[in-house]
Amino acid sequence: MVQSFTPRQRKVRILATLGPASANAEMIAALHRAGADAFRVNMSHGDHDGHAKVIAAIRALEKETGRPTTILVDLQGPKLRVGTFRDGPAELATGATFVLDTDKAPGDAPRVPLPHPELFAALEPETRLLVDDGKLVLRVKSVAPDRIETLVEVGGKISDRKGVNVPDVVVPLAALTEKDRRDLAFALDQHVDWIALSFVQRPEDVAEARRLIGGKAALLVKFEKPAGVARLEEILEIADAAMVARGDLGVELPPEAVPPLQKRIVAAARRMGKPVVVATQMLESMIVSPTPTRAEVSDVATAIYDGADAIMLSAETAAGAWPVEAVTMMDSIARSVESDPDYYRRLHFTETQPDATTADALAEAAGSIIETIAADAIICFTASGSTARRVARDVGGGAGRRRHRCGDRAVGRGTVRAMIAMSGVRIGHRERRSGGGKKSGCNNRKRTHIGTSSLGGRSPVCEGLSVNASVDAVGERNCGDPVRCRRTRRVAPPQSPRRRQGRFHAVARHRAADLTGTPRGRADRSRTGAPFPEYRDAGPSSDIRR
């Protein structure tokens, strides 16, 4: 029996971070009902046993509701920290001298240990050290192999293991620490859908992570260091998605520099067809208050107008007093923005030119068609997902997808979870089904679902950007088996084993017409991105026969 679910009445996706305030099955379900499309597991906190329980709760919710749900694991990355202090927090006076050294003895007001030898080799005089998210500012005066002497430009209280940011130089640290490698192995064993890589500075960092992931999950790169932003296009070229991590960007850069960078990163990701997330302090006041400030509402709306595919809640849902209300508010803001008559016009401020390929030419033509006629949908038959991504970028959405192997065949469940990170695309999956009925006279028939249904071998459908109409259709046909099928003469020849594995049917819902599939092997190049769509289930409405 096919269940029916009301689809989200918006296109942008909501990514909710789980933490002490929300890491239980009841709260995860409440956040999902409120509008969360995907969940972030932060490996900077907690242990593997706790994270495994959270992931299990999400998968149980997915099974209960029938909606694929994306899980993103965020690796901690190479966070630099000072050592400990002998007598508790120390007060640094502005204008005083403060020393960071390799001595492991606990520190005091004049000095503190710094257990990162890489910094001693990378720092130069007049570079800055930002301590405790920029609350304290130190200016390097001299550097020796075992000692860094600094001048306190902005004083304040410093305590054990506070973070250190180095905005002026590229520190020769790998993006993956030993802890990150252990966390990554755990995440892949848990079959999560996305891996977020922190503090990326070089394309080589991304290449190393991709090698370790081995195609088992999609890779999202967090832009939170100026060195990474300086090589934005190079890094995006080999990543699957991007995140504007405004918290650390705002520490290492002047606050006024962050908004232009946010727009630059979002625009670059859309041009390159990569999903993009805007994160950090979006509804910060809702950590302690049931309502946001008007400035925060405007901030969320601006990210949606700019074309962000997902907007993320951090401490609001991880540690705040009002996690469900924060998701509900973000959902309301998104619906309001997308109901604005000028929304699509603003969304297309970023021009996305097609590549010189046949597939891009067809996708571009589909975008032109919807400007001429009022069709209900563009239906894409695709094995790799490339066609759906290309069409979505041309009609206002975007995507990135991967194939997830499960058992001895490729199935839709893992793939649609990854595609929840995209808007503008609906995905249906045709699978081979055993059984049959007296009416059909075939015991080995196939059923094609385009549109909606539940998990468990049917066709999950993700709702995305540029969607104004739905397509709910199912068609039956015989398998062509001359032994088992009594109606062999009325069907096509048997399919190859590859086709029997299952082919994805993606519906880019806007106002458009049919589009044929894209050739296999083409690079996946869509224009606008969108991590994290939503799914609904409904019954068939008409037959499609091939």
Image: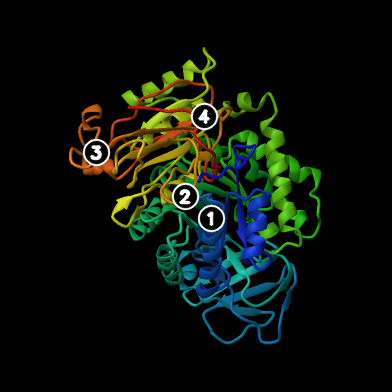
Query: Measuring 35% from the left and 40% from the top, which residue is drawn there?
Result: 438
- Numbered disc 2: secondary structure: loop
Q: What residue type is disc 3 on?
A: Cys
Q: CA distance from mark 1 to mark 2?
A: 9 Å
Q: Is residue 123 left or right of residue 339?
A: left
Q: Earlier in the sequence, mark 1 or mark 3?
A: 1
The residue tagged with tag 3: helix, strand or loop?
loop
Q: Quadrant of residue 365?
A: top left
| Mark before the other along the chain sequence, 1 or 2 | 1
Name the residue carrying label 2.
Answer: 455
Q: Secondary structure at mark 4?
A: loop
Give the left or right position of residue 111, taking residue 385 as reference.
right
Badge 3 crowding class, 10 Å Cα cut-off, few under 14, some 14 to 19, many 20 or more, is some
- Tell me the crowding category of disc 4: few under 14, some 14 to 19, or many 20 or more residues within 10 angstroms, Cα based: many
- Give percent across and percent down for residue 247: 63, 55
Q: Residues within 10 Å of mark 1 (few under 14, many from 20)?
A: some
Question: From what the image shows, is residue 57 above or below residue 503?
Answer: below
Disc 1 target residue: 62
Which residue appears farthest toward the front when viewing the image?
438
Give the residue type at disc 2: Leu
